[in-house]
Image (cartoon, helix red, strand yellow):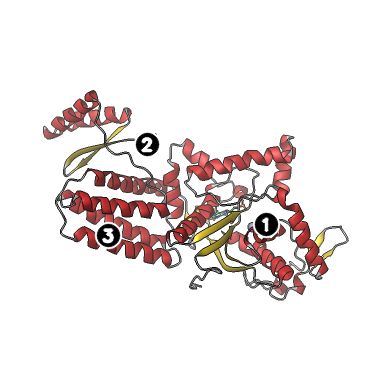
Amino acid sequence: MKEVFKPLEPGKVKMYTCGPTVYDYAHIGNFRAFLFEDLLKRWLVYRGFKVTHVMNLTDVDDKTIKGSQKEQVPLKQYTDFYVKAFFEDIKALNIEPADVYPRATEHIPEMVALIKTLMAKGYAYRGEDGSIYYAICKFPDYGKLSKIILAETELGRGRPGWHIECSAMSMKYLGETFDIHCGGVDNMFPHHENEIAQSEAATGKKFVNYWLHNEYLLVEGKKMAKRFGNFYTLRDLVAKGYDPIAIRYLLMSTHYRQQFNFTFEGLESAKGAVDRLRNFVRRLHETEGKDSKGKVAVLTAKLEACFGGSLDDDLDIGIALASLFDFVREINNLLDDNRVSKMEASDVGGLMMRIDEVLGVIGKVEVEEALPADIDALVQKREEARKAKNWKEADAIRAQLKATGIVLEDTAQGVRWHKEKA
Ligand code: AMP
Ligand code: ZN
């Protein structure tokens, strides 16, 4: 259901996103969730909101304990390794860091306090086995998020395990009621349902105003998950030579409420899309054409309206990207005809930079510098070979240049080159 977003405090957004369990490297299904959240946050910032973002690190649970026992190292040493790996991965994916990354092990007193409140209010009790249980039947709203019907589940009694972690830590950093809570759809029940039950029973206030859940990344129609063994980590793909930014593009470019299959063809076309945007920006720096007589300004205004309007509409990234590539195509046509002035190109470049604050895929592109004389001679030689339709020699020179990190592009204005990103 779509609703108009109204923050609790004008101009500010308080946002909590469920983070990784740090028992292993995160897989790219997990990163689909974190990239959707990154896009949401970047979009809110683009629209002028000051966002406070908290993401927890689950550093104590069965899996982390089991892992540390298996490796015979202290739990903290074990989880620190994967926390560090997680931060390296999000940096490579150009995910904006959260403001706070609370760790479960460092918030036990807050969880104890919340449990004590729930016990004092009669929502929680100690069972015969010594564990403390939450009495779901005492919280009439239970099921309001996931629409689960208790009588139809075997879950007569809910046991808040790691759920209490997110309740306690989100409220500590964001207040008893905050704006946005995100996570994958698998977190909706029981995790988020339990967070609501615990938090609202303890405070008597509404816990979260807007819940946003991303759909799964699939592999051959099945959820990508550790337990199915059908997963790739970011590191697996980087080892195969893929640019993390192409992976970012791929995971971000499907609407968050739609499932999609991971494929290598998809990743290749994501790479192509990123290259296209980078080449476009590079080309803008080089233009020396005539004025477009207002055409560029019209196209720029249209893109701003379409890109903004579609992301405002429940983060409709598909339409936003389609409008961006239409724009690139139309400006490229004008560039082919030498009908973009330096001033116009600079306006377009400015818009591309603003848009990239949201997409985070273009980055700083290297602008042409003078080529070393020997390489320049090769480029000239290739041009001559091309003119003489000696394609074999032209291709051989292209390959030779590629080996030195120089990539050639043939355009209507002749050959252009750029350095390949390391
Ligand atoms: P976890 O470390 O298992 O708690 O998962 C971290 C985040 O990744 C949660 O928001 C999950 O819902 C999400 N997630 C896990 N698997 C997938 C998947 N295949 N596609 C999209 N999101 C996922
Ligand atoms: Zn959580």
User: Could you tell me how far apart the alpha carbons at marks 1 and 3 are, in whole angstroms?
Assistant: 43 Å
Q: Which mark is residue 300?
A: 3
Q: Quadrant of residue 131?
A: bottom right
Q: Which residue is mark 1?
A: 169
Is 321 in front, or is 370? 370
Label 2 sits on what residue type? Answer: Lys
Residue 74 locus on image (x, y percent)? 74, 37
User: Could you tell me how far apart the alpha carbons at marks 3 and 2 are, in whole angstroms?
Assistant: 28 Å
Label 3 sits on what residue type? Answer: Thr
Q: Is residue 81 above or below residue 231?
A: above
Kind of element beneath mark 1 = helix
Q: Quadrant of residue 177?
A: bottom right
**Residue at point 53% right, 43% down?**
89
**Disc 3 or 2, which lies upstream in sequence?**
3
Kind of element beneath mark 2 = loop
Horizontally, residue 222 falls left or right of residue 333, namely right
Label 1 sits on what residue type? Answer: Met
**Disc 1 or 2, which lies upstream in sequence?**
1
